[in-house]
């Protein structure tokens, strides 16, 4: 069960803690909504915090309505029709509240009867006992007690503080939102209308107590209470499903983290209560945050909305557009899932909100230049190093049976992604019709592909074969290895690429060519440039690289069409790049 973003612990007891949303922080009476959930049990705390979060979010919404109400010019007086309509709304609310209480089922426990005296006050009775008694009998007695006092005051023209407070509250409700002048004579009329609505509602409740069916009226213009789950509950189901089917630990952690930030910043509401306005507000916060914002001492411990405002105040450099788009994608992927799962869920509110990149994707990473490729493949790993551990220092070892040696070469001559290569099984090196090729697939619990187009076959270039690649394959087969590069371990996040990516960044720095626009992915761009320079058609280049081009995955990569790919691969060349020092077969043929 994933942790709720508002759940925290003090000592052994769990608490609800929520920052006040930025749009109401200046006027809200508290700096945060923090209170005990009254339990030390984690599972129970998660259940209770959902209910508490929903109630707190209702307070936030009520405060927003109050602010909107006060922003309007004061109304001198309500018409009789308006007062009557508000009474109908209040009557509906009371019956909805009664339905909600019954839906929770009454307890069998008894509670002492409320005794009224001459000084009894409705406010005090409700504050002490509320409208949620532990038993059916207690509930009926409470309603009778409230009704008796309300009738007593109504008959005598008395309006107590409870109904004055109810009148103030109901004017802030959605669909009403009236800023009534404090001196207006309508206040008293409205309070008496609410008393009358309470008396009528009590009659209906008594009939329900006797087993009669009394429908709750629908007041035109009012939005019915949502019956769909809270966002946090739907997210829990989403995480559980994705973790069972496609996510690894890192993917789960990233999606949970950013969904948690969304809930904390925007609020935990029923699914149907979110709109594009909420998505835009979240995007606006991300646009002000620096990359790795939690590592900045000035922002540590702050919720996302406050960290965003603080970062802007301090003039911190915001994260890149690519980063923002990535984080929007984490949250947007939930809403895509939810729209398929729930009839009431809105269309993905994040759709269309990603930032149009100022640079083409191709320009985010540069291909390696010929000079840089020479530096890479003249490093000690390829000419002789002291050991695998001391790969920077020259020596006699050329580690031809290590992924450190083969992975960059395979990417250079196949255009495959780092993870696609490292996860290869020995059985994925196959031969058909005399063509030796790599079968890139996700047939294995530790395998994953980026897209459906990524499953493909890539003929192995003659240069790779000349370098002795098949000797390594046969050695792995003879030793019974499952993976082709078993020396490259999987990262804690469930990806083989994570540790190797860090190693390769260190490698580029060691050979003196690292810059902000090159990385292992630059091999793919180098492969693209080589394909163009070798007059290889774009559709075949896309098929080799696993690019998403409709229809290509069916035309290329299997059966007869493997020959088309092989013909193209035979034309592939890197002009002015001499790797003959890696050619084992040539070296063997030169021996006496």
Image: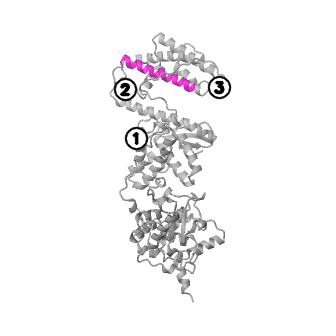
Give the left or right position of residue 214, taking residue 550 as reference.
right
Tell me, yes or no, if residue 539 can be seen here: yes
Magenta segment = 79-101
How far is mark 1 from mark 3, CA to CA? 42 Å
CA neighbours of label 2 inside 10 A, class few (<14), some (14 to 19), many (20+): many
Pointer 3 with pointer 2, Cβ within 8 A: no
Which residue is depicted at the point 62% across and 25% down?
106
Question: Judging from the image, what secondary structure is the residue with disc 1 in?
Answer: helix
Given residues 496 and 107, the one toward you in this image is: 496
- Quadrant of the image for the C terminus? bottom right
Given residues 38 and 565, the one toward you in this image is: 565
Indicate whether 477 appears above or below 449: below
From the image, tell me which residue sits under label 2: 179
* Number of marks present in the image shown: 3
> Horizontal and vertical percent for residue 167?
44, 22
| Labels 1, 2: front one | 1
In the image, residue 566 lies in the stretch drawn in magenta: no
- Of callouts 1 and 3, which one flags the residue occurring earlier in the amino acid sequence? 3
Indicate whether 31 appears above or below 179: below
- Of callouts 3 and 2, which one flags the residue occurring earlier in the amino acid sequence? 3
> Horizontal and vertical percent for residue 557?
50, 63
Indicate whether 225 appears above or below 412: above
- Of callouts 1 and 2, which one flags the residue occurring earlier in the amino acid sequence? 2
From the image, tell me which residue sits under label 1: 277
How far is mark 1 from mark 2, CA to CA? 25 Å
User: Which residue appears farthest toward the bottom when viewing the image?
Assistant: 592
CA neighbours of label 3 inside 10 A, class few (<14), some (14 to 19), many (20+): few
Badge number at residue 107: 3
Give the image's coloring scheme: one colour
Question: Judging from the image, what secondary structure is the residue with disc 3 in?
Answer: loop
Tell me, yes or no, if residue 119 can be seen here: no
Q: Quadrant of residue 512?
A: bottom left
């Amino acid at each position: 069960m994933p942790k709720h973003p508002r759940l925290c612990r003090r000592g052994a007891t769990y608490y609800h803690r929520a920052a006040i949303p930025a749009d109401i922080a200046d006027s809200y009476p508290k700096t945060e909504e923090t209170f005990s959930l009254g339990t030390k049990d984690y599972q129970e705390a998660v259940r209770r915090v959902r209910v508490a979060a929903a109630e707190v979010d209702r307070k936030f919404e009520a405060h927003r309505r109050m602010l909107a109400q006060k922003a309007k010019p004061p109304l001198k007086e309500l018409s009789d029709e308006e007062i009557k309509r508000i009474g109908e709304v209040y009557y509906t609310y009371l019956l909805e509240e009664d339905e909600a209480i019954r839906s929770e089922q009454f307890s069998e426990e008894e509670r002492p009867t409320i005794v009224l005296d001459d000084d009894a006050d409705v406010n005090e009775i409700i504050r002490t006992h509320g409208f949620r008694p532990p038993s059916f009998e207690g509930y009926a007695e409470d309603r009778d007690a409230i009704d008796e006092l309300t009738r007593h005051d109504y008959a005598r023209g008395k309006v107590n503080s409870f109904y004055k407070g109810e009148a103030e509250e109901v004017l802030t409700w959605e669909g009403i939102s009236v800023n009534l002048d404090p001196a207006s004579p309508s206040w008293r009329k409205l309070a008496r209308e609410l008393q009358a609505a309470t008396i009528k509602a009590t009659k209906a409740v008594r009939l329900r107590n006797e087993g009669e069916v009394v429908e709750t009226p629908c007041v035109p213009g009012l939005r019915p209470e949502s019956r769909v789950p809270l966002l946090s509950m739907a997210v829990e189901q989403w995480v559980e499903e994705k973790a069972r089917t496609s996510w690894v630990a890192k993917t789960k952690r990233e999606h949970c983290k950013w969904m948690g930030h969304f809930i904390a910043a925007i609020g935990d509401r029923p699914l149907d209560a979110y709109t594009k306005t909420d998505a835009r507000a979240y995007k606006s916060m991300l646009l002000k945050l620096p990359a790795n914002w939690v590592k900045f001492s000035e922002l540590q411990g702050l919720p996302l909305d406050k960290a965003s405002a603080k970062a802007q105040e301090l003039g911190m450099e915001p994260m890149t557009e690519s980063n923002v788009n990535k984080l929007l994608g984490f949250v947007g992927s939930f809403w895509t899932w939810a729209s398929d799962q729930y009839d009431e869920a809105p269309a993905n509110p994040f759709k269309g909100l990603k930032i149009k990149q100022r640079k083409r994707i191709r320009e985010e990473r540069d291909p390696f230049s010929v000079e840089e490729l020479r530096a890479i493949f003249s490093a000690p790993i390829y000419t002789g190093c002291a050991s695998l551990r001391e790969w920077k220092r020259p020596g006699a070892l050329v580690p031809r049976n290590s992924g450190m040696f083969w992975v960059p070469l395979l990417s250079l001559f196949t255009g495959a992604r780092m993870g696609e290569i490292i996860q290869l099984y020995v059985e994925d090196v196959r031969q058909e019709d005399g063509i030796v090729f790599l079968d890139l697939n996700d047939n294995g619990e530790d395998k994953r592909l980026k897209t459906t187009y990524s499953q493909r076959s890539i003929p192995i270039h003659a240069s790779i074969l000349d370098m002795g690649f098949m000797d390594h394959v046969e050695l792995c087969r003879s030793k019974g290895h499952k993976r082709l590069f078993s020396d490259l371990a999987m990262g804690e996040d469930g990806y083989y690429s994570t540790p190797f990516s860090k190693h390769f960044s260190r490698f580029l720095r060691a050979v003196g060519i690292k810059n902000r626009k090159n990385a292992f992915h630059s091999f793919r761009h180098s492969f693209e440039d080589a394909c163009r320079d070798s007059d290889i058609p774009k559709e075949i280049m896309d098929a080799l690289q696993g690019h998403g081009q409709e229809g290509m995955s069916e035309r290329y990569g299997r059966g007869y069409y493997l020959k088309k790919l092989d013909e193209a691969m035979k034309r592939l060349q890197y002009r002015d790049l001499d790797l003959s020092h890696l050619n084992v077969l040539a070296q063997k043929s030169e021996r006496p």
